[in-house]
Structures are given as structure tokens and as C-alpha cells.
Amino acid sequence: MEWGVAVPFPRCGDIRMSSETPRKATDEEIQSAAEAILDAGYPIALTGAGMSVESGIPPFRGPGGLWTKYGEPPMNQFQRFMANPKKAWEERLSTRNDEFYKPLTEAKPNPGHFALAELESIGVLRFVITQNVDDLHRQAGQKSLAEIHGNWKLIRCLDCNLRFRREQVDFSVLPPRCPECGGILKSDTVSFGEPIPSDVLHLCATHAAKADLVIVAGTSATVYPAAGFALEVKQRGGVMIEVNLYESEITRVCDFSLGGGSADVLPRLVKAVSSLRRSRAS
């Protein structure tokens, strides 16, 4: 597998779980994880579909998943776009209110998103890598962020990687062109078979190389290349903290596995971190 090429993934990350038994983290587990976070020099986070589901966005795979019902997109999705970008844009513009896109327009950040943004604002969390394309981390106020699979609200130039909001793009002629370099514009969401944008990969690699702790929230960390950045931290001797309602493929290798949804566990974790900081400062 080529490192920078997208492999099959739901547009809001991966939500495969290896156990169907819900778990709930104890206060003692939360406290121990909070101590590890405060002891770390450069904590980062990796988030996935579990966080999106808690904001009302349906998963793509698994029971009730949209791809389960309607089938997965073709594995050569990006190649099809490049072969006929005009047709691809016509299809995209005609389906923005269907079952795939409507939940994205209605979703709001949940307490887990706000918790990570707060952890950044108090100077503890340094960076977030998300597999989700839903824009919810941005809406919650996250600043240091890489959306490795793109952002559904943005449009990206395939040549220079500049990104634009929809209202900044002229759709009178399809495919739209970059106002800066003239390159073809495409939705920022990464298609099957499409290389992960080089600027995003570089950003993730830079922060992962500095990290000595990673919080893995709402994902089983099995979808590459995103998973590789989290596992790199662990393989280098760093601490891995899992936040997941169920046991997952990485539970056995985590230093802390906090049972529960991100919307429940992350606010508890941030509250414990804040309290511990105050007690250490006094």
C-alpha cells in the first residue's frame, strides 16, 4: 500500500469495533489518564467516526450504515473524477440534499468536540488529526487541526492545494477552476484511490513526530494512513489513550482504554485534567 494514497474508508472515519459490549470508564481510570496527559510534553489526538455518530451523522459501514444500504462507491472513484470532472461535478451538485449530505448539514459539535477544543485552549493538547469530514472540530473551535480525509464544506485545487468555501467558487463553467493557478477544483473530501493531499500528510507527520502521547477517540485506528500516525507515537515509546464505547483492535496495546462515548468520556477527562492542573499549581 502506498502511504499517501487513500484506502477504503467511510467519509466520517472508520467505526468497526471488535466487541459489542458497551463499557464505562471509572473515575479512577479517568484520573490516571489525566495524570498521563499532564505529564506528557506533546499530547495529540486522533478522532474518528464514533464522534460523528454521537452528533447524529450515520456511519457508512456496519448495521444501518449508508454504504451497507446503498453500496460502497467505486474503488476507482478518483480516477473516474479525473476522466470526466465535468460529469462528476454535475452529479455532486445535484445530490447535496440526499441522505449522504443532509446529516452533515444538520450536525452540531457534541461535548466531545468541545472538550478537545478546551484541552487545546488551556495549552495541553497540541494537535488533532481527524478522519472525519464533518467540519465539527472546526465548529467547536479547534485550531490546530488536520482533516486527513478532507472537509465536506471545502473545495480544493488539485494542483496547488488551496482550499475554498463554496461561495468563493464560480460554478458557471464545470469543472470549476482555481482562481489562483487555474487547476481543476474538486471537493476537499478524499475519494477512493485519491492521494491524501501532501500538505495534510506533512502536517500530520510533523506533529506525530513530536508527540509523546496520543488520545484515540471514536476510532479503532485501523484505517491508514491516519492510524499510522497514532501507532507511531506508541511504537516510539509514547502513551496511547483510547476513548471508545467498545473494545477495539487497539485496546490491548493501549496504556489506558477509557470505556464510553467521546461525548461522555472526553468532558470527564478534560475536567480531571483541569482540576489536576489547579492542584499541582497550588
Image (cartoon, grey):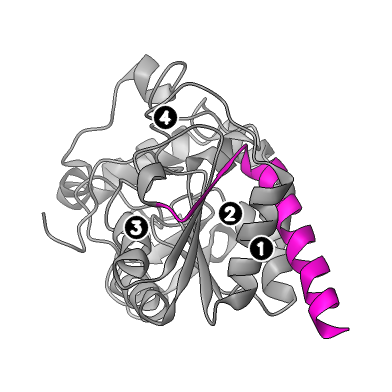
Name which residue lies at 18% across and 43% down: 80
Please give the name of the residue rendered at 41% of the width and 57% of the height, measured from the top-left corner.
188
Few, some or many C-alpha atoms within 10 Å of disc 4 (few <14, some 14-19, many ≥20)?
many
Q: Nearer the viewer, mark 3 or mark 2?
A: 3
Q: Earlier in the sequence, mark 2 or mark 4?
A: 4
Residue bearing mark 2: 135
Is 72 left or right of 41, judged from the image as shown? left
Above or below for 90 versus 200: above
Q: Magenta: predominant secondary structure element?
A: helix
> Is residue 209 depicted above or below 79 in this figure?
below
User: Could you say which is closer to the camera, residue 18 or residue 9?
Assistant: 18
Secondary structure, mark 4, is: loop
Q: Is residue 20 left or right of residue 126?
A: left
What residue does disc 1 label?
A: 34
The mark that comes first in sequence, 1 or 2, is: 1
Residue 80 vertical placement versus 118 (above, below): above
The image's mark for residue 60 is 4
Q: Is residue 94 left or right of residue 243?
A: left
Give the magenta part as a residue range.
254-282
Q: Earlier in the sequence, mark 3 or mark 1?
A: 1
Count of numbered tags: 4
Residue shown at the point (58%, 54%) measured from the top left: 135
**Cα separation between marks 3 and 2:** 17 Å
Q: Is residue 141 left or right of residue 163?
A: right
Tag 3 secondary structure: helix
Image coordinates of residue 190 in percent, x first then y, are: 33, 53
Residue at the disc numbered 3: 226
- Residue type marked 4: Phe
Q: Quarter of the image holding residue 211?
A: bottom left
| Residue 180 visible here | no
